[in-house]
């Protein structure tokens, strides 16, 4: 019987084995995923330092927005909508048919709805007292 290990210390080599395994399994079922990272970043014009932005990937003809954050002083001026639009434009150029993401109830669900996303599921009490919402947008 194989040994089983539980850890709170990520091992990059182990994660690579798992990732490559699932990619190979999935590609055998549905063909090449076309998996590519995507980031849309906001940089300080003087220093070039990253101030915020979004990161994710395109995979199997869908954009997944994994992380999206802007500092308070860059919010509510249309910059967030511009970042989403740029990510979606790049995803379309890569042949994607839609985008998906998740957001907690204390984050920005209303923002995503305003950008044309619709909820396709949620997990109540994740974290306790809040809801995790899943959104998608078909291009």
Image: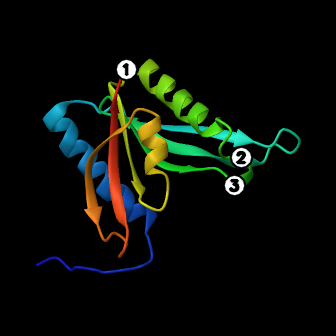
Q: Which mark is residue 95?
A: 1
Where 128 falls versus 83 (above or below)?
below
Crowd class of label 1 (few under 14; some 14 to 19; many from 20; radius 10 Å): some
Q: Specify the quadrant of the image occupied by residue 28.
A: top left
Element class at badge 1: loop
How many numbered markers are drawn? 3
| Mark 3 → mark 1, Cα distance in angstroms | 33 Å
Q: Are marks 3 and 1 in contact (CB under 8 Å)?
A: no
Residue 127: percent from left, percent from top: 37, 72
| Mark 2 → mark 3, Cα distance in angstroms | 5 Å
Residue 92: percent from left, percent from top: 42, 21
Residue position marked by numbered label 2 in the rendering: 74
Element class at badge 2: helix
At a point 14% along the width and 36% down the height, the residue shown is 29
| Mark 2 → mark 1, Cα distance in angstroms | 30 Å
Residue position marked by numbered label 3 in the rendering: 72
Give the quadrant of the N terminus.
Answer: bottom left
Seen as rendered, the residue at the extreme left is 1
At a point 35% along the width and 76% down the height, the residue shown is 128
At a point 46% along the width and 37% down the height, the residue shown is 114
Which of the two residues, 137 or 8, is positioned nearer the viewer here? 137
At a point 65% along the width and 43% down the height, the residue shown is 76
* Label located before the other in sequence (2 or 1): 2
Which of the two residues, 103 or 105, is positioned nearer the viewer here? 105
* Label located before the other in sequence (3 or 1): 3
Residue 79: percent from left, percent from top: 65, 37
């Amino acid at each position: 019987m194989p040994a089983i290990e539980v850890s709170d210390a990520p091992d990059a080599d182990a994660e690579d084995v798992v990732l490559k395994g699932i990619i190979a399994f999935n590609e055998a079922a549905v063909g090449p995923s076309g998996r590519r990272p995507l980031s849309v970043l906001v940089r300080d014009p003087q220093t070039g330092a990253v101030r915020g932005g979004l990161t994710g990937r395109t995979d199997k003809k869908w954009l997944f927005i994994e992380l999206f954050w802007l500092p308070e002083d860059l919010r509510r001026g249309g910059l967030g909508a511009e970042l989403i639009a740029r990510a979606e434009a790049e995803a379309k150029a890569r042949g994607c048919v839609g985008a998906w993401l998740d957001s907690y109830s204390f984050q920005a669900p209303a923002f995503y709805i305003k950008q044309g996303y619709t909820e396709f599921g949620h997990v109540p009490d994740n974290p306790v007292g809040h809801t995790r919402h899943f959104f998608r947008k078909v291009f």
